[in-house]
Image (spheres, coloured by chain):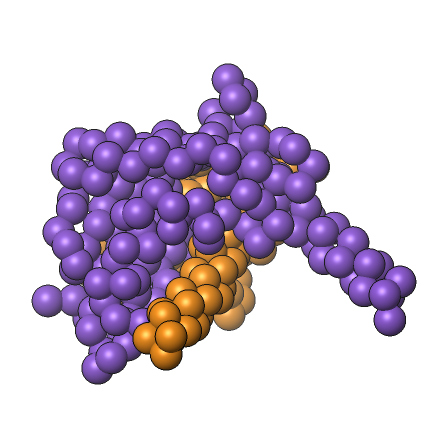
Chain colours: A orange, B purple
Amino acid sequence: MPPNDHELDKTFHALADPTRRAILARLASGEATVNELAEPFAISLPAISRHLKVLERAGLITRGKDAQFRPCRLEPDALKEAYDWIDRYREMWEERFDRLAEYLKELQQERNLDDNA
Amino acid sequence: MTTPDSRTEPNDLGVGKEVTIARVFDARREVVYDTWTDERHIASWFGPRSFTNPVVEMDVRPGGRMVIYMQGPDGSVYPSLGAFTDVTPPERLAFTSVAYAGVGGPFLLEDHTTITFTERGAKTEMTLHAVITRSTPEAADALAGMETGWNESFDKLAANLATIT
């Protein structure tokens, strides 16, 4: 099912923060607890928890049921939706660049013909 | 000073609401710059390959309007309305733009685009940095639809070629 506008905005909002992206990058190599995630950062546990809540609401991570540790897990599908979206946008511009390169070649050829005439 | 070689990904995971593309074109900087500011030129290359641009209006000055109607091979029109925010010939152009699905159709996305033109000998490096400021998931479908339109017209071309040879 395609994500709705709201979900996609939440995903991009979650991805807009460097700490949250670093957390996701860490989770890409496997599950981790809040303490493990907090280790490389010079910020408090509550701050990390707030970041995790944003990621969870965006569907980018899920958290285990274990009341004490609640390990975090990356949910790659939400990330893929966002990636696919931006990828299409990039392709649109890449194609315009291709077309512009061809057009410039035509312009140069016309100019050369004029010069030789 | 721009650093066109730094293709800065917005983050480690390669996901962000912005896109940077750099490419070297075999033409002088003034020529490449003109392809963005001359209505006749824009009409010749903007949009997917099988598309035409029946309406192009460019008032190239800060605050000036920019109107482009792209039309697909199936006749569907994608209007894009914008305004220039930076006009520094022949180095830089920036504009905001809002794309719609059809004339009077629903809003698709809003972006802010900065184009930088850097001399590379007789060639020109063009760097595009686009930030999507508002968007809808439908925009992805529309972009995909444009691509499909392009593939379809290629199929048609291939079919025509097959009958000729």
Identity of the residue furthest to the top in this view? B104
Asked if residue B6 lies left or right of residue A29, the reply is left
Question: Which residue is rendered at x = 24% and y = 79% of the image?
Answer: B122
In front of the other: B83 or A109: A109
Asked if residue B31 lies left or right of residue B85, the reply is right
Regarding residue A19, the answer to whether it shows in the image is no
Q: Work out whether A71 lies above or below A53.
A: below
Regarding residue B50, the answer to whether it shows in the image is yes
Question: Which residue is rendered at x = 30% and y = 42% of the image?
Answer: B112
Question: Which residue is rendered at x = 10% and y = 67% of the image?
Answer: B1
In the rendered image, residue B109, in percent from the top left (x then y), is placed at 44, 34
In the rendered image, residue B12, in percent from the top left (x then y), is placed at 38, 65
Asked if residue B94 lies left or right of residue B79, the reply is left
Identity of the residue furthest to the left in this view? B1
In front of the other: B64 or A66: B64
Check the picture and name the quadrant holding the C terminus of chain B: bottom right
Q: Work out whether A6 lies above or below B128.
A: above
In the rendered image, residue B116, in percent from the top left (x then y), is placed at 23, 60
In front of the other: A97 or A49: A97
Asked if residue A58 lies left or right of residue B27, the reply is right
Question: Which residue is rendered at x = 18% and y = 55% of the image?
Answer: B92
